[in-house]
Amino acid sequence: GIEHRRFSIDDQPSAEEANGDLWGISSAQVTKGKDHVSEIFAEFELPLVADQPGFELLSLNLSGRAFKYDTVEDSDSVWKAGLNWQISPTLKLRATRGTSYRAPGLYELYIGNQTSFLAQAIIDPCVQWGQSTNEFLRANCAAIGIPDNYGGASASATIVTGGGAGVLKPETSRAFTAGIVLTPTETDFSIAVDYFRFEVNDQVDQLGAGAILGGCLAAPVFPNAFCDLFDRNPGNHPTAPYMITEVRDSFLNVNKQTVRGYDMLFRYEKELGIGKLEIEGQSTWTTEAVELLFDSEQEDGFNTDDRRGSIGNPKFVSNLRTALERGDWTYTWFIDYVDDTHSLTANPVFTYLGFPNAFRDIKAESRTYHGASVRYVQDKWDLLLGVNNLFDAEPPTISSGIGNSRYGNVPAFATQYDWYGRRVFMRFNYKF
């Protein structure tokens, strides 16, 4: 097939916003632009061999798309190839390889320069850094010459946001998966194991002013590329020494993100005298999790670009569901497991506010969550009643200064943990 699309954006702020006449309030400029894209695409499903020894079915799937955006200098294309080899009724091999593409959106390209304001105490990590337990922040703020009791300037920092027309590159990715599926005919058990590798390049993103300041000043490697995105007055400034004056938070391209590992899915079902038993589970082992914002890990402020095992990036997660179906009733038990994680940069023993050999918790321990439910089904309605986090397992805690952010002492971005504790749920469906 072929396709042509055109789209535009036209956002007109008020004259007062555009002229910066609103005291203490953000200003904004016109966001206006358009784009056209022309595409041609095709997909083929090709059976190659069938009903032969060792080749019950071998098939190949091919698809591709070529396109041209007006906002992108060169034309581009994406493709995908998939191979399925059913060797026998019990054994199957499969693999896919492909690419993807996303041109920057109109808002990301053409957003008119906007300004906003943040107080120094909110945005500057070096304010009162003498009270911080982050040894990197303490060392970096001291290296700049900022006093440990610095209270921040009275004026706010200006945050500037703008589009990336002429600078932003399209997002691209490459993906590869390969796996084996076993479905023995003499048993009620099946299992699939897949290897995966995904790489995303030049993702369009906006960091946020807080992440820019924290990425510069709280990083093991200092200075780094984050430090080029804001301006600070020198210490000898006559009226506002060390004040953060401007933070440039425009859209940019993230260098590379790569994740690699293995997925396993299994299922077992058996008719028993008391009903039908079903057991199914899924597990993921992550062997690589690279995040590279700039050209090197040192420019990111780190000595490694592999985040595998860091807080929020467990190496292993798994879930299991066991259900017994007996007439109109289904009884289910759930188990979810999250592997432990830890800080990749901090040491458990450190100097705390001048006191050596202090200890802190840099590890978020593993957690296992259990849940149970009962479901009753009739022709026109069904009722489900259950309990999540049956044993009221609390999320792990870490010490202050560990991890990007915390709620209390719980790592904020470790989303695998249960935040709410034991809770009951109910669902009722009725067919009219």
Image (cartoon, helix red, strand yellow):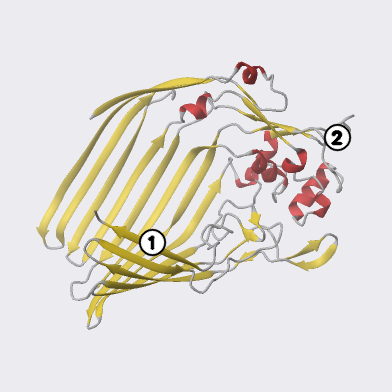
Q: What percent of the width, then of the height, locates residue 134?
A: 74, 55
What residue did someone put label 2 on? Answer: 241
Instruction: Give the label on residue 180, or none.
Output: none
Q: Is residue 24 above or below residue 391?
A: above
Q: Is residue 298 above or below residue 153?
A: below
Tag 2: amino acid: Pro
Count of picture labels: 2
What residue did someone put label 1 on? Answer: 263
Which residue is nearer to you in this view: 126 or 142?
A: 126
Q: Secondary structure at mark 2?
A: loop
- CA–CA distance between discs 2 and 1? 54 Å
- Is any part of residue 241 visible from this angle? yes
Q: If you read the primary sequence from the N terminus, does the residue marked by circle 2 or circle 1 appear first? A: 2
Name the side, left or right, on which 385 lies relative to 49: right
- The quarter of the displayed image where residue 252 is located: top right
How would you rate the neighbour count of disc 2 (Cα within 10 Å): few for under 14, some for 14-19, many for 20 or more? Answer: some
Name the side, left or right, on which 394 lies relative to 398: left
How would you rate the neighbour count of disc 1 (Cα within 10 Å): few for under 14, some for 14-19, many for 20 or more? Answer: some
Tag 1: amino acid: Asp
Which residue is nearer to you in this view: 58 or 160?
A: 160
Which residue is nearer to you in this view: 407 or 296?
A: 407
Q: Residue at 42%, 49% (x, y): give it.
A: 198
Q: Residue at 44%, 23% (x, y): give it.
A: 71
Q: Secondary structure at mark 1?
A: strand
